[in-house]
């Protein structure tokens, strides 16, 4: 079992297994998909698939191991979750000038998904934010 630790604390480090982290990421992904509709814009989904595939190959990942989705929301956001999930809101495509800019955002999201430090308390807080984000987004866009 692989684990990550929180370094630099006076207390003993908190340990969370990579399996637990992945399970939390998959739970957040399922929740997000149930709360925010998927985009019906095939052009945006194709662009995300192409961009993320190119970027994943460059960092040694197999694009077939990852799920990518464009979410139907004007929010400007992109994220990658443990469990190999990448999400981009339609709003992100509207504020970028080309697929290279989307690619740079996707790479940053993928890199953020792989931090070396995890603490259960912090991760639970992040999951709470992710779970409540769709509700906030839906209220903001008038649903």
Image: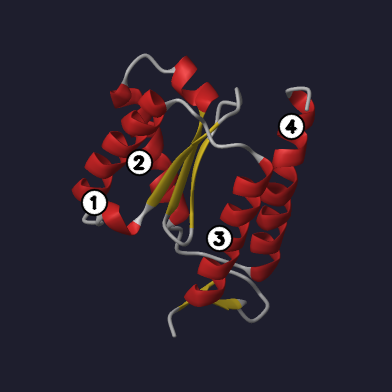
Task: Tell me whether the residue at label 3 lies in contact with that at label 1, contact meaning CB atoms closer than 8 angstroms.
Answer: no
Task: Tell me whether the residue at label 2 lies in contact with that at label 1, contact meaning CB atoms closer than 8 angstroms.
Answer: yes
Q: CA distance from mark 3 to mark 2?
A: 18 Å
- Of marks 3 and 1, which one's residue comes earlier in the chain? 3
- Of marks 4 and 2, which one's residue comes earlier in the chain? 2
Query: For this view, does 92 lie left or right of residue 30?
Result: left
Q: Is residue 65 above or below residue 5?
A: above
Residue 60 visible somewhere in the drawing: yes
Query: Where is mark 4, residue-wise?
Result: 138
Query: Where is mark 1, residue-wise?
Result: 59
Q: CA distance from mark 4 to mark 2?
A: 26 Å
Task: Tell me whether the residue at label 3 lies in contact with that at label 4, contact meaning CB atoms closer than 8 angstroms.
Answer: no
Query: For this view, does 117 lie left or right of residue 110?
Result: right
Q: Residue furthest bottom?
A: 1
Q: Callout 2: helix, strand or loop?
A: helix
Q: Which mark is residue 25?
A: 3
């Amino acid at each position: 079992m692989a684990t990550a630790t929180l370094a630099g604390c006076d207390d003993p480090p908190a340990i969370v297994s990579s399996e637990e982290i992945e399970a939390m990421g998959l739970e957040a992904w399922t929740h997000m998909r149930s709360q925010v509709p998927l985009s019906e814009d095939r052009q945006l989904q194709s662009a995300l698939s192409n961009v993320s595939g190119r970027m994943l190959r460059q960092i040694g990942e197999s694009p077939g191991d990852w799920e990518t989705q464009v979410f139907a929301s004007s929010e400007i956001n992109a994220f990658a979750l443990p469990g190999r999930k990448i999400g981009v809101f339609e709003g992100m495509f509207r504020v970028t000038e080309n697929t290279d800019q989307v690619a740079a955002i996707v790479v940053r999201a993928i890199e953020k998904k792989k931090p070396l430090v995890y603490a259960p308390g912090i991760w639970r807080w992040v999951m709470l934010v992710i779970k409540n984000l769709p509700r906030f987004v839906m209220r903001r866009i008038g649903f």
